[in-house]
Image (spheres, rainbow, N blue to C red):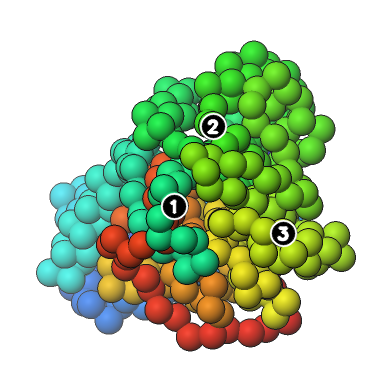
Amino acid sequence: MSRFDALLALSCLFDFMVFAVLLWLSARHVSSKGTMRVGAGILLAALCGAIGIVAAKTLTVAVLGLEVFGLIHLLYLDLALVAPAVGVLILVFRVVKVPGVGSVSFGACGTIAALCSFLLIPLCVYTTYVEPFNLKVESCDVVAARMASDKSPIKIAVLADMQFDEVTAHEHRAVDLAMQANPDLILIPGDVFQGVEKQYRLQESAIKSLLAKLEAPGGVYVVSGDCDRLSTLTKAIAGSQIQLIDNQIKQVEVRGTTIAVAGIPIEYRSSQAKDTLYKASIVADRTDLTIVLAHRPGISLLPYMPDNIDLIVAGHTHGGQIQIPGFGPPVTASPVPKVVAAGGLSELNDHLLYVSRGVGCERGHAPRIRFCCPPEVSILTVGGSPTHVALKQTPDVTGSDLN
């Protein structure tokens, strides 16, 4: 058991004990007054007190250095494990005599709260063990205004944020789905492998076999993401058709259509990235289609993004991983509008931006969860004649503090 796993176990035990003690104290308080029924007010006060103590513990752990994904993991386990356990405790109080108190009823409110907490169990099982592997193919038609209508549409497969620490059937299925579309071009907006060097060495053969399956007439291109180490990524793609194009521009021709792909890594505000975009604007005047491949969608907010870029393809947000119906993702880790970061094709600052929801999930200390945001392999059909396009219209956004 790692130190982080031990922290998770101790955190769950601490949180459960806090709730248990405060419920017991509430029962003692009511018992001393000659009744064995705890009212809604006292129950609510006990639960609020417990939540306050748990929040203080979480804040303390954060101050001691636990990063944000670890904190999210702590809170997620409180929902998945601690809340249902407290629900069981509330029901047990009714039939088991508590020392110094006897049997206690927390009333209708307590019973309803306990039963509702049990609904969290199937919900959390689904978000952890079902949806993260419910891989979808997202098809999207893109109209490139500068592309001549007599040019053949270009099919592009996007494999964003695979973010695996070991190769499983899930990653093979994602690659197979991309290849089944017979794409002209394959774009990988970073975050390929998320693991330490030791994990990579153990998985190197499997990783190389996986990535070697990716082939396309117009090439396969990748830029580095947040969790990619350049040394590891370079070794992983060696011997495959995949080309790392950080701050580079590649030009190809597919069925008479000239295409330029400009690669921008995570440091999209660097002088090198700015220079690459400037060169891309020059190249764009000599090509039918110019694409910027970036990891972070925040690049679309740059005031100096050239007007003649036809399409920006990015990942990074995972669509938020959790999307609440009618609200969208609570967190996207991106400065672009929430509706854009949620994934899909949007028009932002007069540029077409496609954000993939990604193949994998955040790893490390983060919990593996997806809800109403399944993983996806994206197939973009880019042409000069409109077919079926549904754009999320968003207001122009400007800002200097971009992520």
Kind of residue sitting beneath label 3 = Val
Kind of residue sitting beneath label 2 = Pro
Identify which residue is drawn at 74% across, 64% down: 282
Residue 46, percent from left and from top: 38, 72
Identify which residue is drawn at 65% across, 22% down: 240
Circle 1 residues within 10 Å: few <14, some 14–19, many ≥20: some
Between marks 2 and 1 in the image, the one whose residue lies nearer the viewer: 1
Disc on res. 187: none
Residue 365, percent from left and from top: 60, 45
Q: Are marks 2 and 1 in contact (CB under 8 Å)?
A: no
Indicate whether 199 appears above or below 142: above
Circle 3 residues within 10 Å: few <14, some 14–19, many ≥20: many
Residue 348 or residue 75, whichever sits in front? 348
Residue 116 or residue 109, whichever sits in front? 116
Between marks 3 and 1 in the image, the one whose residue lies nearer the viewer: 1
Distance between mark 3 and mark 1 Cα atoms: 18 Å
Disc on res. 217: 2
Q: Seen in the image, is 227 located left or right of residue 98?
A: right
Q: Label 1's element?
A: loop
Identify which residue is drawn at 27% across, 81% down: 41
User: Which callout, 2 or 1, points at the residue further toward the start of the chain?
Assistant: 1
In the picture, the quarter occupied by the C terminus is: bottom right
Disc on res. 283: 3
Q: Residue furthest top?
A: 205
Report which residue position mark 1 lands on.
151
Inspect this view and state whether residue 401 appears: no
Q: Seen in the image, is 330 located left or right of residue 3?
A: left
Q: Seen in the image, is 313 located left or right of residue 129?
A: right
Residue 226, percent from left and from top: 69, 50
Kind of residue sitting beneath label 1 = Lys
Inspect this view and state whether residue 134 appears: yes
